[in-house]
Image (tube, helix red, strand yellow):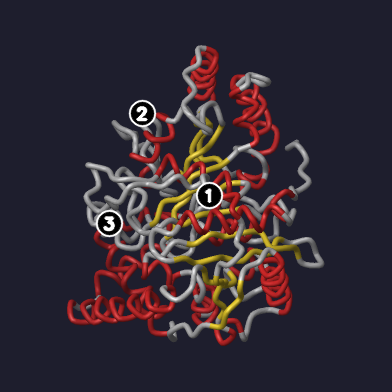
Amino acid sequence: MELASHLRTREVSSLDVTRAQLDRIAALDGALGSYAQVTAEAALAQAEVADAEIAAGQYRGPLHGVPLAVKDLCWTEGIPTAAGMAIHAAHRPTEDATVVRRLKDAGAVLLGKLQLTEGAYSDHHPSIPAPKNPWDAELWPGMSSSGSGVATAAGLCYGSLGSDTGGSIRFPCAANGVTGLKPTWGRVSRYGVFELAASMDHIGPIARSAADAGAMLQVLAGRDPKDPTARLEPVPDYLEGASRGVRGLRIGLDEAWIDDVAPETKAMLTDAMATFRALGADIVPVRLPDAAQAIADWFPLCAVEAALAHEATYPARKDEYGRVLAQVLEDGRALSATAYQAILLRRMHFRGLVDATLGAIDLLLLPVHPFSPPTVATMQALGEQPDLVSRLLRYTCPFDLTGHPTLTLPGGFTQAGRPLAFQLVAQSLAEATLVRAGVAFQGITSWHRRHPALRASA
């Protein structure tokens, strides 16, 4: 992070930067609605501590004194954690989620909690206004980490936490023109993070650059005694080899998988390929397995796991749920055990086929979704167009089913000035390769440095 070096040398203070961020939130977020709650007093206190520690030579690393924000899905001790749900508006955890604790241990300043869709599914609760895309209020802000994408793009934090179960780090990054890293499933602890679908939930950073995302993942990743599903492998230094470039890396492309994307998206992918070639990477043809059944299976699998996650309050408090999430929970409760087992077996088979493809290359290049940037109006009609939902998830949910890591990178803009993005997919635990490729791409492109023009709220 560029800010980190200025904080370390004390050219700027964390307290001044934090005050500036809080002032910016006060001026702009009334119109954007990205924050569920701003914790100004706690943030200023954390900034004072960070300045004192840095002055005393007790520098903790590149997040020390940097103002960040957390998706309101992660427990924060004594601070409401609602998970985008009216039913949990008064919930005050008695401890931090592991990811929150690790950010605090790294000396980060936490500005507050960021808004999201209800229970991290696809729709915001009817009583909670959805965040607005800072590039254009008519544009979709992404789901479910909508507040994380909006706040990071609008400069209301230097980075944020998101989660991805079907595409919810990748969608808001693509929609808002920022960078997002979905780690390998289990690379980051899920302890203290409200579940949507436990076997597919991934927690990861949303940031302004691949280097920033790598710095955040460095702190977040690793084993956790409180989460037995967290991976036990040592965490590498994600930034150590980030400057090595991509010369000699094999980047796979399956032309059949991108045959029906929008012209603007296709042109963006072509430009991304040309950029990686210019950097010395080899673009190689690959054959990915047909994902149609996997995409169809994602919906009932997510529904079953969500029904279990909400068992304490649904159906007992059904009337307090929004229509979309309630229907998902009903679907999950209705699925038979034999149908569920068939899904699990197909999932294992699909994961094996994807593993085999990724084992022959270093990275896979794909769009985030096949459309040009969708509008809010288009996305509100999703429930009436099942085919549109499947197309939306075509490039995202398969890699939540398999658990492979992905990196979303801004890749251009439409003629109307709307952000475009693509994703890179890697073998399990190959996040360092993703960061390395992202740093190389962003070293000779400037899409990630473009910011929306914003005016203060009235």
Location of residue 200 (image quadrant):
bottom left
Q: Is residue 436 left or right of residue 405?
A: right
Residue at left 39%, top 58%?
429
Residue at left 52%, top 38%?
69
Tell me which label, 1 or 2, sits earlier in the chain.
Answer: 2
Label 1 residue SS: loop
Q: In the image, which disc is placed on residue 78?
A: 2
- Residue 171 in the image: state x and y as whole percent: 55, 62
Location of residue 100 (image quadrant):
top left
For badge 3, the amino acid type reads: Ala
Q: CA distance from mark 3 to mark 2?
A: 22 Å
Residue 109 vs 205, above or below: the answer is above
- Circle 1 packing at 10 Å, graded few (<14), some (14-19), many (20+), is few
Q: Nearer the viewer, mark 3 or mark 1?
A: 1
- Circle 3 packing at 10 Å, graded few (<14), some (14-19), many (20+), is some
Label 3 residue SS: helix
Residue 62 vs 407, above or below: the answer is above
Q: Nearer the viewer, mark 1 or mark 2?
A: 1
For badge 1, the amino acid type reads: Gly
For badge 2, the amino acid type reads: Gly
Q: In the image, which disc is placed on residue 241?
A: 1
Label 2 residue SS: loop
Residue at left 65%, top 68%?
374
Q: In the image, which disc is placed on residue 309?
A: 3
Residue at left 44%, top 86%?
290
